[in-house]
């Protein structure tokens, strides 16, 4: 049984409330940090742990904290990125729903370490239930003396606020999030300066993901060295994985980094294999923005060593071709799934969510969606396949933020590994259209306009 650090008490009745969370060891990390440690000591403990950002990039958290500028007389801010918008990713929402005080405790400890007296949790606007849960939990923590003035008599003050977002995927990028938090349109900023120098209201700012901040709690409770013993190589600790797709047991799992991918997919402790007795066709390992890998590559072994659920192994690890652990949005496709249709669906999302600030992304995502639409509807040409590859290359690396890369990688990797399927869509237009017609027959009909009006 894998060790659980974040979800250990997730099934305890009432764990979302302050009293039950406290009875199960909650807020010990706050007491330890504020009463026995200095802010620099907390930062060093996080460095020792080897914790890497759990939002997608995997940058060392302690190092990111150490970059924070500390000019005299300037406010410093901690912002939690809870704008979980990556298709296939829902682990942060799960954590905020069921054990919100874990995030709040992590926010208090991290804010203390960074010298922030005002901190924010920026939550995706559609997550209204989670916003209300967090606001209620913050009120409970404040009533108990863990927020506000002179916390636990330590002399440290902290105010924590929940800020709803506008429902834009682009606001998951930290500088676009900061723009939105300031009340502006969520367009990414050109860097440098980085948020550590000039972030919220031009003040030094750290932006961390929900899971990253929550992981600070067990690090302080158990020590960074103990945390670093869990995992594999530079991928230390545990990781929340959002598992979805054609799996027998989709859901949120906490794994020890370094778990073999095959074990994660097929063991009863985790996903329980592919649904309906089908064979695995492909996997998107870290959310829709990472390259797709066919089954033979995701399950490949080198010298008897399997591919692991870790940052290094999934990105390459000597396997000749790789993907990314990303945000942990693990999507499995069985043998009956159409890769072209899936790629088109992802491209529709990225075209819709592009902020339009950069021409390669604004125009390129539109082109990719249109070409994939033609292929998926029986109107494609062989030249369209190479056109998609060319457009993806012109987007990748040429935008202010990573959304361009996120849009390009799924398309390029799908063609690289499943080119024969794209070519089949060109040479068999009749079968493609008949298949799509069959899907349309079983789709839910759109409600009539008068029905929508009556519901409102």
Image (cartoon, helix red, strand yellow):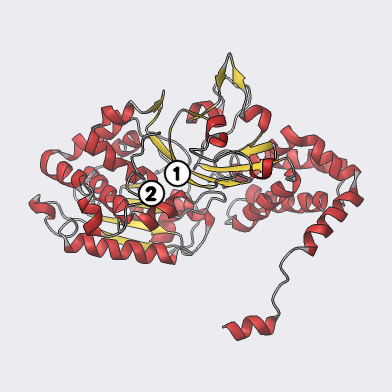
Question: Does residue 293 appear left or right of residue 421 in this picture?
Answer: left
Labels 2 and 1 touching (C-beta < 8 A): yes
Q: How many marks?
A: 2
Q: Quadrant of residue 236?
A: top left
Reply above or below: 445 against 438.
below
The disc label shown at residue 385, or none: none
Indicate the position of residue 440 as horizontal and vertical percent values.
78, 62
In the image shown, does 203 or 403 lie closer to the viewer?
Answer: 403
From where the camera sits, is residue 316 visible?
yes
Q: Position of residue 418 (x, y in %)?
A: 75, 36
Q: Nearer the viewer, residue 442 or 136?
A: 442
Q: Residue 132: which quarter of the image?
A: bottom left
Up the image or down, 237 lies above or below 144; here it is above
Residue wearing tag 2: 210
Task: Say which residue appears at 80% left-offset and 51% top-offset.
Answer: 376
Badge 1 marks a residue whose secondary structure is loop
Secondary structure at badge 2 equals: helix
Residue 432 position in % (x across, y down): 85, 50
Left or right? Give the position of 300 relative to 51: right
What crowding class fits label 1: few (fewer than 14 Cα within 10 Å), some (14-19), or many (20 or more)? many
* Residue 209 seen in the current view: no
In screen coordinates, is 25 left or right of 356?
left
When the figure is inspected, residue 348 is found, relative to residue 223, above or below; the finding is below
Q: Which residue is mark 1?
A: 55
Please give the name of the residue rendered at 70% of the width and 46% of the height, measured from the top-left corner. Answer: 343
The C terminus - image quarter? bottom right
């Amino acid at each position: 049984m894998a060790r659980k650090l974040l979800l250990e008490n997730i099934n305890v009745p009432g764990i979302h409330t302050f009293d039950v969370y406290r009875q199960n060891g909650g807020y010990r990390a706050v007491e330890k940090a504020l009463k026995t440690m200095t802010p620099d000591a907390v930062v060093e403990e996080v460095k020792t742990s080897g914790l890497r950002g759990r939002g997608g990039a995997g940058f060392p958290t302690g190092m990111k904290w150490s970059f924070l500028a500390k000019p005299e007389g300037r406010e410093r801010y901690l912002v939690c990125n809870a704008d979980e918008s990556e298709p296939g990713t829902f682990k942060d929402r799960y954590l905020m729903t069921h054990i919100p005080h874990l995030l709040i405790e992590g926010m208090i400890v991290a804010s203390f370490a960074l010298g922030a007296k005002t901190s924010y949790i920026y939550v995706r606007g559609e997550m209204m239930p989670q916003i209300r849960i967090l606001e209620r939990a913050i009120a409970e923590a404040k009533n108990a003396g863990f927020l506000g003035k002179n916390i636990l008599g330590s002399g440290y003050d902290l105010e924590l606020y929940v800020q709803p977002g506008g429902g834009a995927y682009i606001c998951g990028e930290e500088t676009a999030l900061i723009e939105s938090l300031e009340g502006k349109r969520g367009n990414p900023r050109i860097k440098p300066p980085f948020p550590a120098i000039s972030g919220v209201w031009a003040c030094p700012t750290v932006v961390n993901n929900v899971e990253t901040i929550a992981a600070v709690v067990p690090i302080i409770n158990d020590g960074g060295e103990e945390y670093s013993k869990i995992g594999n190589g530079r991928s230390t600790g545990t990781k929340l994985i959002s598992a979805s797709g054609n799996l027998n047991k989709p859901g949120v799992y906490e794994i020890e980094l370094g778990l073999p991918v095959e074990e994660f997919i097929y063991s009863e402790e985790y996903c329980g294999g592919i649904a309906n007795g089908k064979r695995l066709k492909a996997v998107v390992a870290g959310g829709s923005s990472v390259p797709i890998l066919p089954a033979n590559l995701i399950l490949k072994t080198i010298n008897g060593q399997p591919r692991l659920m870790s940052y290094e192994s999934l990105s390459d690890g000597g396997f000749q071709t790789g993907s990314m652990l990303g945000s942990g949005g693990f999507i499995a496709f069985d043998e009956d799934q159409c890769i072209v249709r899936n790629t088109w669906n992802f491209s529709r999302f990225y075209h819709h969510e592009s902020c339009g600030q950069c021409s390669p992304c604004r125009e390129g995502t539109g082109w990719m969606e249109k070409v994939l639409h033609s292929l998926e509807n029986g109107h494609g040409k062989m030249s369209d396949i190479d056109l998609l590859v060319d457009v993806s290359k012109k987007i990748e690396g040429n935008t202010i933020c990573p959304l361009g890369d996120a849009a390009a990688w799924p398309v390029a990797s799908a063609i690289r590994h499943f080119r024969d399927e794209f070519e089949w869509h060109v040479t068999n237009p009749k079968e493609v259209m008949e298949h799509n017609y069959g899907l349309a027959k079983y789709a839910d009909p759109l409600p009539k306009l008068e029905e929508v009006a009556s519901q409102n």
